[in-house]
Amino acid sequence: MKQFSKKSRPPVIWLGTNTCAGDMLSLLNSLEPGYQSLITDLIDFRFNYLLGSAEGDTATGVLKAVTEEQRGKYILVIEGTIPTRTNGLYCVVGNRDGKPLTALQAVRELGGGARHVVAAGTCASFGGPYAAAPNPSESVPVQAVLDRKVINVPGCPINPDWMMGTLVHLVQYGEPELDGFNRPKIFYGDTIHDICQRRAYFEDGIFAEKPGDPWCMYKIGCKGPVTYADCPNRQWSGEHLSWPVKANTPCIGCTSPEFPDGDAPFFEHLPDINLPGIKISANRFARLAGAATAFGISIHLIGSILTGRVADTIKKDFSGGISRKLLSIIKNTDGKRYGGKN
Ligand code: SF4
Ligand code: SF4
């Protein structure tokens, strides 16, 4: 196994905000390199919300010390959304001087001095399940509260390789090439559909009728045509054993900005787009979605709304429900911007 240069180990803070902890737990499944190699050879974990044992002022003191002493040198990883309701009190990451330290405060304080800021998982990157309807905590993605670039590593949870590879790249080679949503292209450069082992079935029109069938999952809801990730090649678990379509169930598009509200219903297929003078089939959606719109609403969804070929529940969400509400939260978060392009 390749050993990393110890002298290049940068300090890393891994902060948990509104999260189920799935991303950090997934990272622990990495095998090449493994977690032990990560913390002894690659990075210097100064703070990890899940694995650290310190509490109270001791723990928050570490955050303060890193911010002051390692300015411009540390990597800040954030897992989870940032609740904005009631000045962020829906997520408290610790206590400081007898007062709660909210995730909103902590991310803003730590974000300014970091060498890199990385959003781990779809919640931190785009809002994900924690910002899904009805979003009572008024949660937003990390980018919405920071006026600087955030590298997004989405997935629900992240594949261990996506985060490990991003950290390795940052330490060894600097910032990886990013797409329009600030995702590393090395992991999110192709659609699932483009590299799917069942693509031939799609082209030949041989479709599964139910989960468990061994053919193309398009008709039972596969979001592979509009989802950017390398799951078919990389596969999941540390040993790269399987992925949803290989297990005979559709891809639900968890690395996409619109996940989960925009990808539901998960078991209904993507509609074709019929715009005046143009018809776009599912296998071309992805190229359009790659140049996707502000605020993470993809072309296919807009097309679906325009043509009325989308479920009423989704129409409701995007015409006056949570997604509009989320956008207004994002726009109103102290004027900070949630954007894709750098
Ligand atoms: S992106 Fe998924 S795995 Fe990560 S915190 Fe959100 S719900 Fe959990
Ligand atoms: S629709 Fe899904 S299952 Fe079918 S070829 Fe595309 S990615 Fe594979």
Image (cartoon, helix red, strand yellow):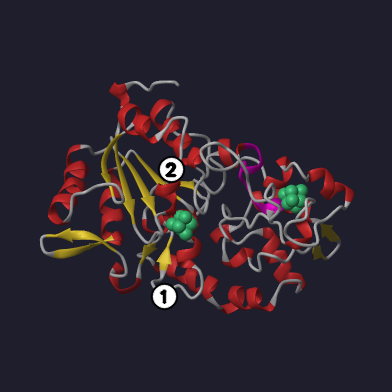
Q: Residue pushed farthest left?
A: 97
Q: Is residue 138 magenta?
A: no
Residue 136: image tag: 1
Res 67 quadrant in image: top left
Mark 1 secondary-structure assignment: loop
- Residue 248: horizontal and vertical position, in percent? 71, 53
Residue toward you, 98 or 285: 98
Query: Toward which corner of the image does residue 55 lie, by quadrant?
Result: bottom left
Q: Give the residue drawn at x 70%, y 65%.
A: 267
* Residue pointed to by mark 2: 27
Q: Earlier in the sequence, mark 1 or mark 2?
A: 2
Q: Residues within 10 Å of mark 2 (few under 14, many from 20)?
A: many
Q: Secondary structure at mark 2?
A: helix
Query: Which residue in the rendered view is the most extreme toward the front?
Result: 212
What segment carries the magenta color? 224-233
Answer left or right for 109 relative to 41. Answer: left
